[in-house]
Image (cartoon, rainbow, N blue to C red):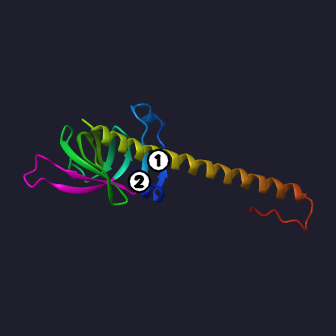
Amino acid sequence: MSDDFAELSNLSLRLPEEEQSARHRARFRVISEGVSVRVTWPERPDGGLDSFEVDDISAGGLHMSSPRDLFAAGQNLILDVLVLGRCCVGAIKAHVVRSTETGCAVAFEELSRNQELRLDKIVLEMQKRVIAQLKKEQQEEELRRAREEAASVECDSSDVNCLNIKL
């Protein structure tokens, strides 16, 4: 299974910014670039098959970007979750929870044990990367502050030969 998730190291990730929406969710969600879904509508005569970018994902569902009024609450879908174009979890039964002008929220249902494990793995790997990214940013900020402090200690404000340069 580890080979199936090698692409996760190439994703650009960030944490959700809205504190309020996080309180209303049953599971932790991760916002990611590079994750998409292939959607099949069972009720469409042609079977319907379209792809959409995922705005955020959790082990219980996702939000995807889609044109206005394309989806309706209660609509049943079959989803394949793709990471960088490669299917990592296939044939997930889901239903639309709500539809907005910019996309729709989808809840997974009747997940097999394998589907659940694979979704958990995707979210966990993304969480690890987000934490590592946040730590790196924090360390860089601390280093920047230390450099600024060192530069200001070396230079006396009355010294005309000293330039206070930010590194």
**Does 145 appear in magenta?**
no
Secondary-structure class at tag 2: helix
Q: Which of marks 1 and 2 is in front?
A: 2
Tell me the magenta residue range.
33-53
Question: Which residue is under mark 1?
Answer: 125
Q: Distance between the residues labelled 1 and 2?
A: 8 Å
Relative placement, left or right, of 161 versus 137 is right
Q: Residue 60 or 166: which is nearer the viewer?
A: 60
Label placed on residue 5: 2
Q: Where is residue 2 in the image (x, y as percent from the top left)?
A: 42, 51
Using a 10 Å C-alpha cutoff, classify the residue at mark 1 as few (fewer than 14 neighbours), some (14 to 19) or many (20 or more).
some
Examine the rendered structure and indicate whether residue 70 appears above or below residue 117.
below
* Earlier-in-chain disc, 1 versus 2: 2
Image quadrant holding the C terminus, namely bottom right
Q: Position of residue 56 (x, y in %)?
A: 39, 46
What residue do we see at 10% from left, 50% from top? 44
Amino acid at pointer 1: Glu
What residue do we see at 77% from left, 52% from top? 146
Secondary-structure class at tag 1: helix
Relative placement, left or right, of 46 versus 62 is left
Q: Where is residue 62 in the image (x, y as percent from the top left)?
A: 33, 43
Examine the rendered structure and indicate whether residue 111 appears above or below residue 5.
above
Q: Residue 97 or 164: which is nearer the viewer?
A: 97
Residue furthest to the bottom in view is 161
Please identify the quarter of the rendering in which residue 48 is found.
Answer: bottom left
Relative placement, left or right, of 105 versus 4 is left
Examine the rendered structure and indicate whether residue 103 appears above or below residue 25.
below
What residue do we see at 31% from left, 41% from top? 114
Mark 1 and 2 residues: CB-CB less than 8 Å, in contact?
yes
